[in-house]
Image: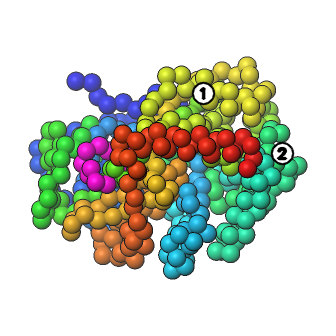
Amino acid sequence: MSSPTHANSYYAASANDKALRPQLTGEKRCDVCVIGAGFTGISTALSLAEKGKHVIVLEANRIGFGASGRNGGQIVNSFNRDIDYITKHYGDEIGKKMAKMAFAGAELIRHRIEKYQIDCDLKHGNIFAACNEKQFGELKAKKALWEAHGHNELELLTQDSIQQHIGSDRYFGGLLDRKGGHIQPLNLVLGQANAFEQLGGEIYEDSQVMRLEEGKPGKVVTTQGQVIADKIVVAGNAYVFGLLPEVEKKAMPCGTQVITTEPLPKALQERLLPSDKCVEDCNYLLDYYRLSGDGRLIYGGGTTYGARDPGKIESIIGPKMLKTFPYLKDIKIDYAWTGNFLLTMMRMPQVGKIGDHLYYAQGYSGHGVTNSHLMGEILSDAIDGETERFDVFASMPQYPFPGGRMLRVPYTAIGAAYYNLRDKLGI
C-alpha cells in the first residue's frame, strides 16, 4: 500500500519536515481527540497541550494536506465579513465582541512563530489593492472602521504610492496593513505540529476516521484502530466527509488555484514587489500573490465551485498573472496546484457543539490562515471551560445552502458570475 502524499506544490517541495507519522493501530485513550491535522486541528491540539491535556490528532492524509498546506500563505486580518457587516446583521453586542477577535489570529501566529522558533519565511505587511474607484472608497471605509476598533498600523495608498509596492499599473490605490503578512503555510503548520509533539501530543497520519460513536467517553474509529476520548473535535473543514452530515450541508467546498514561478533574479523581484508585501485585490473573485522566501512569485486566484479540480491550472492562472505583470511572459512556471476551502452562506466561520463532548469548526470562507488559528485557541478554551468567545460564534445562525447538495453549486456559481460581472464593470 502506498503512503499518502501532499499535492505536488512548491510548499510540499520546500517543506522543512517530510517525515511520515505512523498510522493509528489498535486502541488509544486520551483527553481530547482532534480529527484533522490542518491549521484548525493543530492549533486546537497545541493550545490544549499547552494546558496539559493529552491529545491525539488523526489525519487521513498528511499534516497540512488540505487548505492549510495549499493556500496563498497570506496573513489577512478580520473575517470574510467585516465588523460593520457583523454589527448590522447580528447586533451591537456581537459586533463588539467579534471586533475584539478580528485581529487576534495574526497576533497568535506571530506569537507561536517566535515562541517555538518556527522557520516559515515570515514577512510583514499585506496590501489590499483596489481595481477601481469604488473599491478604493471601500478601502477608505475599511481603514476608518479598523482604526475605530484600535488597529492603527494602516496606510492608504494612492494610485501613485501603490506603485512603490507593486510593479503594476492595474490599481487605483490600496490599503497597507502592517499587521498583516505572509508565510510558507505548510511549514507553519508543520512547525506547530512539531511543537505539539514536543509537549507530548500524538499525531497519526494515514488514519482516516470512518465513524464517531456517541458516549462518555466517545469513540473515534479509523480504518485500523480507534481512540477513546473524553472530548472530540472535528476540524477537517473542506476535507471531511460523512462524519457530521447535518454540519457538512451548511458549507460548500470550493477550489482555488495557485502557480509558482521559477526563482527570479533579485532585480526582477524588486520590480514586482519592491517592499516584499503580499497582495490581494478587492474583486469578488480575487487574485492574490507574493514572493516566496527563495524569490519566486506565488500567484493564485480563480474559483471552482463544488471542489472540481481544473485540468490545466496554469492556463487559468497564467493569464491573470500576465494581466498584472505582462513582463513575466517568458518566466517559467515550476509548480501549479489546486486546493479546497469551505464557503458558508453567511461567509462567517461556523462553530458549534453537539451533545456534551463533540465540537466542530469550519467554513472560514477564504480567511482561513488567521481565523483557523484563532478558532483552535477558542475551541481549546471552550473544552477547558472558558466558553465566552466560543459562545459568540456559536450564537450566530448557521444556514444550509438552498437546494441541498444538488443545487448549492449552481446557485453559488450563478452568484459568483454576477459578482464577477460587477467587478469588471466597477459597480
Q: Is residue 48 above or below residue 128?
A: below
At label 2, counting other C-alpha atoms closer than 10 Å, the crowd grade (few under 14, some 14-19, many 20 or more) is: many
User: Can you identify the residue that label 1 sits on?
Assistant: 316
Q: Which residues are magenta?
A: 236-247
Three-letter amino acid code at disc 2? Gln
Quarter where residue 324 is shown: top right
Nearer to us in this view, 400 or 139? 400
Farthest residue, direction right: 160
Residue 394 x %, y %? 38, 68
Residue 246 part of the magenta segment:
yes
Asked whether, in this view, residue 32 is left or right of residue 323, the answer is left
Farthest residue, direction bottom: 93
Three-letter amino acid code at disc 1? Ile
Nearer to us in this view, 284 or 187? 284
> Which residue is painted at 21% across and 66% down in the image?
355
Asked whether, in this view, residue 267 is left or right of residue 248, the answer is right
Q: Earlier in the sequence, mark 1 or mark 2?
A: 2
Asked whether, in this view, residue 299 is left or right of residue 272, the answer is left
Residue 264 x %, y %? 70, 29
> Which residue is painted at 26% across and 52% down in the image?
244
Q: Secondary structure at mark 1?
A: helix
Asked whether, in this view, residue 378 is left or right of residue 183, the answer is left
At label 1, counting other C-alpha atoms closer than 10 Å, the crowd grade (few under 14, some 14-19, many 20 or more) is: some
Quarter where residue 20 is shown: top left
User: Can you identify the residue that label 2 sits on?
Assistant: 163
Q: Is residue 145 above or below residue 198?
A: below
Residue 11 x %, y %? 51, 35
